Amino acid sequence: MLAVKIICTAALIRLVQGQAFVGCIDNLPSDTSHVELEGDCDSTCKKAGYEYAFWSVIDKECRCGTTPPKTFMYNIAQNEYGLCLPYDYSVSKIHVPFEFHICAKTIEISSTSNVQARETIVNAMSECFDSCLEAEYVAIAPQWAKPTYICKCGGMPISYAPLTCGEGTYYGFTNPSSKGKKQGGSDRKQKHRPQRMGKQTVQEGAIQNKIVDKPGRYGGGL
């Protein structure tokens, strides 16, 4: 009976695996390859068996790869919802059961009867996802001065302070297939909606400078 339960759980996780936005970059990992679109970029890279999709809105170019962006590659987006600047690539992690929620300066994660809130340091976002499959919520922050990531996971957030996605911010993800959400335990019924604190602001002029600097790198290439 136990074996059947484990097999069913694993099958469910595979069933809901999709892709999730993980950041904006302009400096691509060396192993990315240009591909012809078959639908959108995420589904094209997923069908081809890659782990990451890189979509350039301005060039309408899709590139796929197996190597994640390094922490120093993360750029400032246009908002906390992951809208990248025109000259950047929007990056998605393929084959994950998580969905991108929001970027924030801080995210306080709760504990539930199914999973205890915890924080660790990992070498890649995928390590955080893999170690938190039973969690309801995951928050990952690329450490700008280090090649590592802060990984938080547990129940749904108690509070968060939205901040434009970029270097050092937390990227929050929900897990539709988490054990707690499927069971709907009594502890979840008692929870209130997470407190959304006032939106934080990025350093003045950072986005404007980003937009102004970009065209020079693409001069004559369009």
Image (cartoon, rainbow, N blue to C red):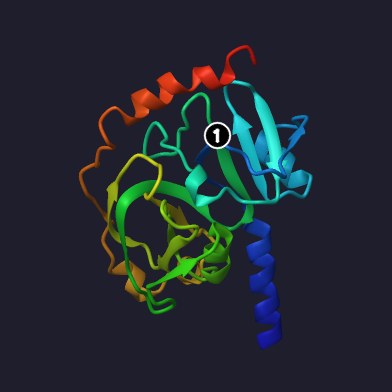
Quarter location, residue 186? bottom left
* Residue 137 visible to an observer of this rendering: no
- Tag count in the figure? 1
Q: In the image, is residue 153 above or below residue 201?
A: below
Residue closer to the observer: 157 or 35: 35
18 horizontally vs 142: left or right: right
Residue 200 placement (x, y as % from top left): 24, 42
Residue 166 placement (x, y as % from top left): 40, 42
Residue located 79% across and 45% down the image: 48
Q: In the image, is residue 14 above or below residue 35?
A: below
11 horizontally vs 171: left or right: right
Residue located 69% across and 43% down the image: 30
Residue assigned mark 1: 26
Residue 148 placement (x, y as % from top left): 48, 60
Residue located 45% across and 33% down the image: 83
**Crowding at mark 1 (Cα within 10 Å: few <14, some 14-19, many 20+):** some
Quadrant in which the N terminus is drawn: bottom right
Quarter location, residue 211? top left
Quadrant in which the C terminus is drawn: top right
* Residue 75 visible to an observer of this rendering: yes
14 horizontally vs 38: left or right: left
Q: In the image, is residue 37 above or below residue 161?
A: above
Direction top: furthest residue: 220
The amino acid beneath tag 1 is Asp
Residue located 39% across and 79% down the image: 113
Residue closer to the observer: 11 or 163: 163
Q: In the image, is residue 204 above or below residue 159?
A: above
